[in-house]
Image (cartoon, rainbow, N blue to C red):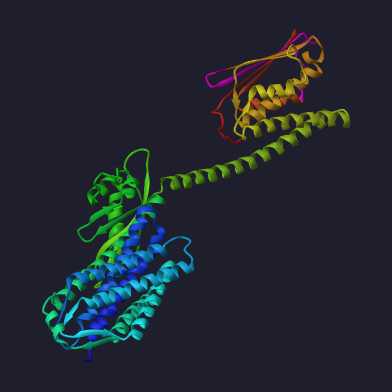
């Protein structure tokens, strides 16, 4: 007798086989991204999907099988065939899932899996109850075994490789076709003979349509759940990657504006992960001025279809900012269906930009200040050179005096450079001028005072002129002479007294003022807005300098 296979069920069995192959490859590919129990769970899921699809394909194909008499199935053998398919697939997948599984191991596992699939097929055929006797052509049986082994081995090798989506689109139909080919090769090996004993046995068993319907529904449900699990796993991986990068995820359904946010997004918005955060709560965390702007930006996003990308300030102190980015998803007719996007805390980034902008402004100010200082310094040097040359008796005297004054100016510049051109120490300037003398000859008393650049340059030159005059004509010109410098700060003014004692006697004020005294008065009174007074007492010179102080670090500009 000859049996018939209906084309509709041949196509349906092929679809189930391809769908199962695709699912198994996708699930097996995810095994590498997990360890421990999760890895074992995905291996079982992949094996069950593959085994169930092969078993389902077999019985769907059998639904279209017409041996010429009514057909029923033995439930026990039917479910034994399912156990054989799933068991063989599980064992092979576990054998092939090792990180260092060699090709020989894959071939052996593929052979065992193919043999299990063949055994599933012929066990399922043994469950057949009909009024015919079934026999087999051994050559075609062997060919079906070869096809099953080749298909199984190919499936294992394919599952080991992390290929692209396009590759799986090609691999799934090939594997599905091989599995279907194995089934129909085995069916071609079938020899049917009508007997009375077979007719009596056909009376018992489950109706084929009931069994096939249940098998198809159950298998499709298993495969569907496997795909859903795969998609869920992929979603979990994506969310985990976003959270690892400090990025929160959100979804906004439209038009009802139901908001769902991830735990990281709640953290970015300043809420606890266990707190509810709907659309109203989201509006509540924004700064009051940001709500109107957000509504306008959202309306434009929905109207124009552009991506939403805006930075909002949150309520509270210290101020925080979040970057909300999103994209509109539309239905087939173009209506907005929902928005999805991410939320990032950009507070540190905005503060860094603000600090950078402040630094650039400060740098520009420093450059302008430096240019101004250079011009002033050059003018000072020009004036010192002219006045020194006018008073010098010869070139050697001019050179010696001019160099000493330039060195004094240089020391003041060095002190300002050490303070970042923001301030210099008053005591440091005095020590620089009186360094050659012992503590008995040069006595300093006063609090620690920081001078601004303008004050430091002016007073530094004044101290140099006083020290030079004392060394040449005053108390520091004799071993027993001494200079006492004391200062105090009163009502934001620096008052400094330079007193010389035990030096050559002074008979009175000089008939004409020298360059040094004129430089001190010009610097203190005109440049610094202070006062400078000289008292020529018989016991020694006394100079009092009073200048206003400003906050240390303030950059000033000379008029």
513 falls in the magenta region = yes
Q: Is residue 421 above or below residue 46?
A: above
Q: Position of residue 540 (x, y in %)?
A: 74, 11
Q: Position of residue 95 (x, y in %)?
A: 41, 63
Residue at left offset 35%, top offset 57%: 40
525 falls in the magenta region = no
Residue 77 visible in the current orientation: yes
299 lies left or right of 197: right
Q: Position of residue 404 (x, y in %)?
A: 79, 28
Residue at left offset 19%, top offset 58%: 256
Which quarter of the rendered picture does the C terminus lie within? top right
Q: Nearer the viewer, residue 199 or 153?
A: 199
Residue 474 visible in the current orientation: no
Q: Is residue 204 above or below residue 325?
A: below
Q: Is residue 447 above or below residue 131?
A: above
Which quarter of the rendered picture does the N terminus lie within? bottom left
Residue at left offset 22%, top offset 68%: 221
Instruction: Specify the quadrant of the image occupied by residue 324.
Output: bottom left
Q: Is residue 386 above or below residue 152?
A: above
Which residue is at the far front?
197
Residue at left offset 38%, top offset 53%: 36
Q: Nearer the viewer, residue 545 or 84?
A: 84
**Total residue callouts:** 0
Q: Nearer the viewer, residue 87 or 312?
A: 87
Q: Position of residue 134 (x, y in %)?
A: 23, 84
Q: Which range is magenta?
A: 489-514
Which residue is at the far bottom?
1
């Amino acid at each position: 007798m000859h049996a018939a296979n209906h084309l509709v069920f041949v196509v349906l069995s092929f679809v189930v086989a391809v769908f199962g192959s695709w699912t198994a490859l996708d699930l097996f590919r995810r095994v590498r991204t997990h360890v421990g129990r999760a890895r074992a769970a995905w291996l079982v899921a992949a094996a069950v999907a593959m085994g169930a699809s092969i078993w389902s394909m077999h019985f769907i194909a059998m639904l279209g099988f017409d041996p010429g008499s009514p057909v029923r199935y033995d439930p026990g053998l039917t479910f034994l065939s399912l156990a054989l398919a799933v068991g063989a697939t599980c064992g092979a997948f576990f054998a092939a899932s090792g990180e260092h599984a060699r090709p020989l191991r894959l071939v052996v596992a593929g052979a065992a899996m193919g043999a299990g699939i063949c055994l599933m097929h012929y066990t399922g055929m043994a469950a057949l109850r009909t009024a015919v006797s079934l026999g087999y052509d051994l050559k075609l049986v062997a060919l079906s075994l070869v096809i099953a082994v080749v298909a199984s081995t190919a499936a294992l090798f394919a599952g080991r490789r992390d290929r692209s989506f396009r590759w799986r689109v090609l691999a799934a139909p090939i594997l599905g076709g091989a599995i279907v080919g194995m089934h129909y090769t085995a069916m071609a090996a079938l020899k049917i003979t009508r007997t009375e004993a077979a007719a009596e046995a056909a009376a018992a068993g489950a109706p084929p349509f009931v069994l096939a319907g249940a098998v198809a529904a159950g298998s499709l449900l298993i495969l569907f759940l496997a795909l859903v699990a795969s998609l869920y796993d992929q979603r979990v991986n994506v969310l985990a990657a976003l959270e690892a990068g400090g990025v929160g995820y959100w979804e906004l359904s439209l038009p009802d504006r139901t908001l769902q946010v991830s735990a990281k997004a709640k953290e970015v918005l300043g809420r606890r992960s266990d707190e509810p955060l709907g659309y109203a709560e989201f509006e509540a965390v924004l700064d009051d001025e940001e709500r109107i702007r957000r509504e306008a930006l959202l309306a434009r996003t929905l109207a124009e279809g552009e991506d939403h990308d805006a930075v909002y300030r949150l309520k509270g102190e210290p101020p925080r900012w979040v970057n909300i980015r999103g994209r509109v998803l539309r239905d087939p007719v173009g209506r907005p269906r929902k928005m999805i996007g991410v939320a990032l805390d950009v507070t540190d980034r905005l503060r860094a930009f603000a600090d950078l902008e402040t630094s650039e402004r400060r740098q520009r100010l420093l450059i302008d200040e430096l240019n101004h200082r250079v011009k002033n310094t050059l003018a000072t040097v020009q004036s010192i050179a002219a006045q020194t040359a006018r008073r010098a008796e010869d070139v050697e005297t001019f050179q010696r005096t001019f160099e000493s004054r330039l060195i004094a100016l240089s020391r003041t510049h060095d002190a300002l450079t050490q303070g970042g051109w923001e301030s210099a120490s008053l005591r440091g300037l005095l020590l620089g001028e009186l360094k050659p003398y012992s503590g008995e000859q040069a006595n300093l008393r006063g609090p620690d005072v920081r001078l601004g650049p303008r004050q430091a340059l002016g007073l530094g030159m004044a101290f140099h002129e006083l020290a030079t005059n004392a060394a040449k004509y005053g108390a520091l010109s004799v071993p027993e002479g001494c200079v006492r410098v004391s200062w105090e700060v009163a009502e934001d003014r620096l008052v400094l007294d330079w007193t010389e004692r035990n030096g050559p006697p002074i008979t009175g004020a000089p008939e004409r003022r020298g360059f040094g005294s004129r430089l001190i008065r010009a610097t203190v009174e005109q440049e610094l807005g202070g006062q400078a007074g000289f008292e020529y007492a018989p016991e020694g010179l006394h100079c009092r300098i009073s200048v206003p102080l400003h906050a240390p670090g303030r950059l000033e500009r000379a008029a």
